[in-house]
Image: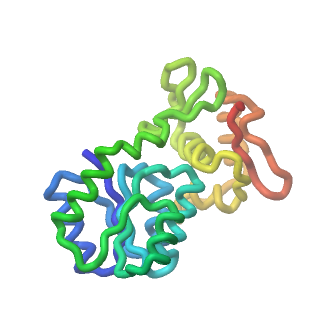
Amino acid sequence: MSKILLLEDDTNLNETVTEFLEDEGYEVVSVYDGEEAQEKLYENRYDLLLLDINVPGLNGLDLLKESRTQGVAAPAIYITSMDSVEDLEEGFKSGCDDYIRKPFALKELKIRIETLLKRGFYHQEKERIMITGDIAYDIKNNELIIQDKPVSLGHKEATLLKLFVKNEGRVLAHELIFDHLWSYDEEPSDSALRTYIKNLRKLIGKDRIVSIKKQGYKFITEK
């Protein structure tokens, strides 16, 4: 079952499209603003993105631009009422694969989605990211693989590794890590974070997670 992220701030249209696509056999995660869509993209992997451009907060164009820089390769369709050549050019430059203009027929949307999925664009996103020669991260199953065997991780370590892999080469501030590692009713802990880092380093190598003084941590794969 293909998984689709739908960003549409019009409640009626959001609900209509969601219900239609679910009836067609798709799994749909629907959101109403750009920030929420950004969170969902961080949390899960999708086979296709269906994005309205003019939404509250982070707009669809900027959301997709940022997502592409983070390695999200899922095909994207913009939902828009814009129709100028300049708008089309900007949209395709931001990384979209297709457009559908409002108002549209649901059958047309279905055809466009099926066409993109059949092209297999989503396979551009690697199933595994190599960390070292014999250590990899399985994106689909969120697993650490060492010498082709899955390795069990604690919940916090698994969450932390996923965060690092999705942000390879970027310095992640302590505050950002705290926000993703601990829920609102938990108390973040520097010492606990250091322990989780230590545990991961034992498995993937100490050089893979670099401590940046007074800034945070950076995850790097073996080149």
User: Which part of the image, by quadrant, shows the C terminus?
Assistant: top right
Viewport quadrant of the N terminus: top left
In this rendering, the answer to whether 167 lies above or below 8 is above
**Percent position of residue 129, x then y:** 56, 35
Toward the right, the furthest residue is 213
Give the left or right position of residue 30, taking residue 60 as reference.
left
The one nearer the camera, 152 or 212, is 212
- Position of residue 68 in the picture relative to residue 99 (left or right): right
Question: Which residue does the image show at 70% across and 52% down from the upper left?
Answer: 170
| Relative height, residue 183 to residue 62 (above, below) | above
| Residue found at x 72% / y 58% | 173
**Figure coloring:** rainbow
Considering depth in this image, is 11 or 95 the residue closer to the camera?
95
Using residue 114 as the reference point, say whether residue 151 is left or right of it: right
Q: Provide residue 118's location: percent of width, then percent of height.
A: 29, 44
Comparing 55 with 88, the one in front is 88
Q: Position of residue 88 (x, y in %)?
A: 44, 72
Q: Quadrant of residue 51?
A: bottom left
Please name the residue shown 52% across and 75% down the image: 58
Q: Is residue 192 above or below residue 132?
A: below
Image spot of residue 208 (x, y percent): 72, 36
